[in-house]
Image (spheres, helix red, strand yellow):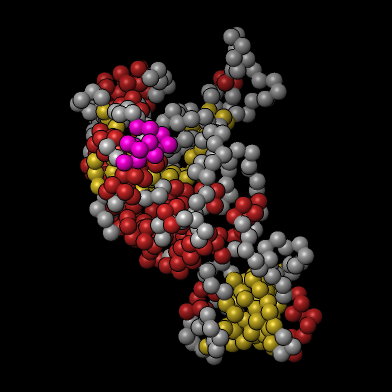
Amino acid sequence: MEHIRRSKVAHLLKETGFGKEVNVKGWVRTRRGNKFVNFIALNDGSSIHNLQIVADTTKFGDELLRRIATGSAISVNGTLNESEGSGQNVEIQAAEIEVIGECSPDHYPLQPKKHSLEFLREIAHLRFRTNTFGAITRVRHAMIFAVHQFFSNKGFYNIHTPIITASDAEGAGEMFRVTTLDLNNPPKTEDGEIDYSQDFFGKSTHLTVSGQLEGELAAMGMSDIYTFGPTFRAENSNTTRHLAEFWMIEPEMAFYDLNDNMDLAEEFTKYLINYALAHCAEDLAFLSKRLQEEEKNKKADERSMELLEKLRFVVENDYARITYSEAIDILMNSKPHKKGKFQYQITGFGSDLQAEHERFLVEKHFKKPVILTDYPMSIKAFYMKQSDDGKTVRAMDVLFPQIGEIIGGSQREDNYDKLLERMRVLNLPEKEMYWYLDTRRFGSVPHSGFGLGFERLMLFVTGMTNIRDVIPFPRSPKNAEF
């Protein structure tokens, strides 16, 4: 083949320089034709749309064309023309076609028909080639870029916090242990316990559940930082909302109080969703149509909000800000509570709010995103700033439609004595946490931060309903393929 620099499908679909010679490479989605002409739909992952290749049957012959099956990889040199067919603006009149990689139609599992998401999870190594997962992957990339752009534009520094750690930031659940000890014959102490002093790090270590505590250390010298890294939870939760490995975005800001923290969380989430609306329009339109098709047989009141409408619901409204106590009063006086419609009943102050309660506040009561503040101290983490009332902490949760909590954060306790007292009440190992306490001993300042689960954001932005469909290679109980 004559060498012509390769063009991406997404670029050629927008090209107007008709009549020029181009090269495109990709994977065949479909081929159809007759004894005069064959039409090949080609995709290289750069666009939700395929590029049509027009191949003269008599020129290329049946032997070559039969090798061009769904899934095969080809390279095409040809002339870019304005398309006469409906559904596309451009097409390529093929001059040369090379089959780069053949694909047997008898064995390739992604034939041109509708596949269930469950089936695609079983072949996750191939699902990037589908429209749905191509769209999700492009949106995911756009959101990753937007996260870094937002914080960089605001003068934040990205910090890589450790993946292997000896501290548990949240008391957030079971952790994955990291060890090099012989599991068949581990060394023991005199008490019969496993002797981790002989392990690689000389102590018990595990995969991190959060980069927050280490992020606070960086904020105490750099002012505004953020982490964006993998976190791990060894919870045996086989649900559509849980992963054993997921990504977290955690900013920490010195000299921020709770109000500053809420302002940043609202600005951040609106920035991300506006970025998606501006840069992922075609993929979001496809995902919206996919969701509507999936839910067409549901009752009207059980269907999801239309995807673009849901995204605009967030960016076009100021977030309501209320205290936990005010939320409890609203819920206690609500029709669903009085009629016993909530699956989890609200019993008053101290109740742990569930997704159904959060969604009621957002979708039915306020009809806008909600930020809840000032939670009971008893149901929140040790590091949160204690309020003057002695009962609540300066925590905040950002609640979105359909998904409930999307961000959790707080002003952090900056008073050494109060933090130490709280750690002692909860039996946290103050000797091992000396480094965290030091930040309150040496130049302590008010500071705040929050965490955004990236896959939770991706569920919201794409309209997908299973968290395993918004991460390339999901890790869940009994599932660590690839």
- Taking the magenta stretch, the answer to whether it contains residue 321 is no
Residue drawn at x 35%, y 38% as measured from the top left: 339
Residue placed furthest toward the right? 63
Toward which corner of the image does residue 423 lie, by quadrant? top left
| In front of the other: 326 or 303 | 303
| In front of the other: 186 or 317 | 317
> In this image, 316 relative to 184: left or right?
left
Q: Main secondary structure of the magenta part?
A: loop
The percent coordinates of residue 140 (x first, y second) are 47, 57
Is residue 410 visible in the rendered image? The answer is no
Q: Is residue 435 above or below residue 72?
A: above
Is residue 12 visible in the rendered image? The answer is yes
The percent coordinates of residue 173 (x first, y second) are 48, 30
Residue drawn at x 54%, y 52% as measured from the top left: 469
Residue drawn at x 57%, y 74% as measured from the top left: 50
Q: Which residues are magenta?
A: 335-346
Residue drawn at x 63%, y 43% as measured from the top left: 480
Image quarter of the N terminus: bottom right
The percent coordinates of residue 420 (x first, y second) are 31, 20
> In this image, 206 relative to 284: left or right?
right
Q: Is residue 424 above or below residue 389?
A: above
> In this image, 43 relative to 310: left or right?
right
- Taking the magenta stretch, the answer to whether it contains residue 341 is yes
Toward which corner of the image does residue 37 lie, by quadrant? bottom right
